[in-house]
Amino acid sequence: MTVSTQSGFRPGADNAPMPLAEARRRIVAAIQPIAETERVALEQARGRVLARPVIAGVDVPSAANSSMDGFGFAHAHVDRDGPRLKIVGQSLAGHPFAGSVGRGQCVRIMTGAVVPPGVDTVVMQENTTANSDELVIDTCPALGSNVRPAGEDLARGALVLARGSCLRPADIALLASVGSADIEVFRRPRVAFFSTGDELRPIDGPIKPGEIYDSNRYGLAAQIEALGMEGVNMGVVGDSPAALRAAFRQARECDAVVTSGGVSVGAADFVLDVLGEQGSVDFWRVAIKPGKPLAFGTLGNARFFGLPGNPVSTAVTFVQLVRPALVRLSGAIPAEPIRFTLPTATRLTKKPGREHFLRATMDWRCQPPQVIAVEHQGSGVMRSMSRADAFIVLPADCSDVAEGTDVTVEPFAQTIWDRPPSD
Ligand code: AMP
Ligand code: MG
C-alpha cells in the first residue's frame, strides 16, 4: 500500500531515512519542557527535576569541627613551648567544649565535634601519649590539620543544585544537609503508550499459533517507570484506522505518546496515516538497524513516537530517541551517550547503509577487556537485548569487521548486578 497522510507527508526519495544523530537533535530541539511545578517532600524527590535552584541557607558544616578522634590545640603554642600540653576538657559531637583553650592547653576532641576557640589543629589520638590530664604530642601535624572549616562543603548563599538537576540519591542527601525539607520540582510527564497489532494477546491467557504475547507494552511501561514518569497504559489497539483514531484522540491529552508497531509500509500499518490526520508527521524512518521505521510528530499537546513493532527495534529506538526526548520533556538535560572503544571478540558482519546497534556484553575480566556481540542479532530476538549491557555501534558506511578490531561501545545498563553464571 502507499502511505499518504492528510498532512501531505509522503515517504519517498525526499524522505530518506534520517541519520540517528540528526533525528535525535531534531527530536530534542522540538521538545518544549513541562513548565508546571509542584512542591514535594524531600523523601519523595528522587528522580524528580528541580524547578528552581536551591541556595544554601546555612553553612555546611555549620561550625569548624574535627575530622579525627584526637586532641585540639593551637599550633603556634606547640611550636614555641614544646609538645607537652594540659588536657582541660573535651569536645564531643553535639556537646561542644564550653570554654576556650589557652597556652599550654589542649582538649580531647572527637570526630564531628566543634573546634573550640583557641584551637586551630587536631592531632590524631594514635600520634599522642596521654594520661588523665596530660598529653604529649609524639608527631605534630601541620597547622590546620584535621580541622574541617565551617562552610567547607557549602557556604551559606552558595548554589546547592541548579534548576534542571535530576535528583539522584547523593543529591537528596546534599539537599537534606542544607535542611531542604521540601522542594519545587517540575510536574512529571504523563506518557501514554499502547501496542498495535491484531496478533497480540494478553500475557495471562493462552495463545494459538500465529498469535503472540504483547511483550512490547510491558517493556515500554518499565522504561517509563524507570524514568520516574507517569505512564498511561492504553492496552492493545487493533490494526484498523478506526481503532487507532479513537486511541489517538484519547492519547493526545498526555505530554507524550509512544506506540509500538504498525508504522511500516505493510497492508495493516495505519499509524502514520492516522498521525497525519490528527496531528503532523515531522519525520519517518531513521537510518539505523534495528529500528528503521519510526515516526516522530505531534498529536495535540503531545509529542508522538511511533516505534517499530519488532521487540528489539522497540527497545533500541526507545533508548536512542524516546528516552532523551522524555528527559528533555521532564525539564532535565539529556546526557550524551557514553562511548569508548573495545576490541570485538568476534567477527561482525554488516552491509554499508545504516548505523547498526548490535547488542553485546562487555568483558572486563579478560586482558585486554573486550566486547562480545550476543549471538542472535535478529530484531525479533529479545534475548539479545535482555542479555546485553552495551551496544556495539557500527557507523553507516562500515562493512564487515574483523575479530580483534576496536569498535565503538555504548553501555546502556547499570552494572549493579552481575548475570548468574549459568546464564
Ligand atoms: P509491525 O511493526 O507492526 O510490523 O510489527 C513487526 C513485528 O513485531 C511483527 O512480527 C509483530 O508481530 C511484532 N510485534 C508487534 N507488536 C508487538 C508487541 N507489542 N509485542 C511483541 N511483538 C510485537
Ligand atoms: Mg503490526
Image: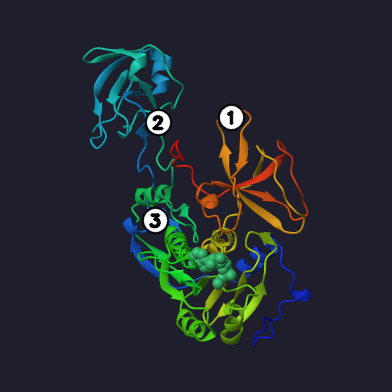
The image's colouring method is rainbow
| The disc label shown at residue 366, or none | 1
Q: Residues within 10 Å of mark 2 (few under 14, many from 20)?
A: many
Does 15 appear above or below 326? below
Q: Amino acid at mark 3?
A: Arg
User: For this rendering, which residue is in front, 378 or 69?
Assistant: 378
Query: In the displayed image of the protein, which residue is found farthest to the left?
Result: 132
Q: Amino acid at mark 1?
A: Cys
Determine which quarter of the picture holds residue 24.
Answer: bottom right
x and y percentages locating residue 206 in the rendered image: 38, 65
| The disc label shown at residue 46, or none | 3
Q: Mark 1 and ligand 1: say if the CB distance to the nearest ligand atom is below 8 Å.
A: no
Whether residue 331 is visible, yes or no, is no
Distance from disc 3 to disc 1, alpha carbons, whole Å, reads: 36 Å
Determine which quarter of the picture holds residue 309.
Answer: bottom right
Q: Residue at x 67, y 73 (%)?
A: 283
Does 38 appear above or below 363? below
Q: Residue at x 48, y 78 (%)?
A: 238
Q: Amino acid at mark 2?
A: Val
| The disc label shown at residue 147, or none | 2
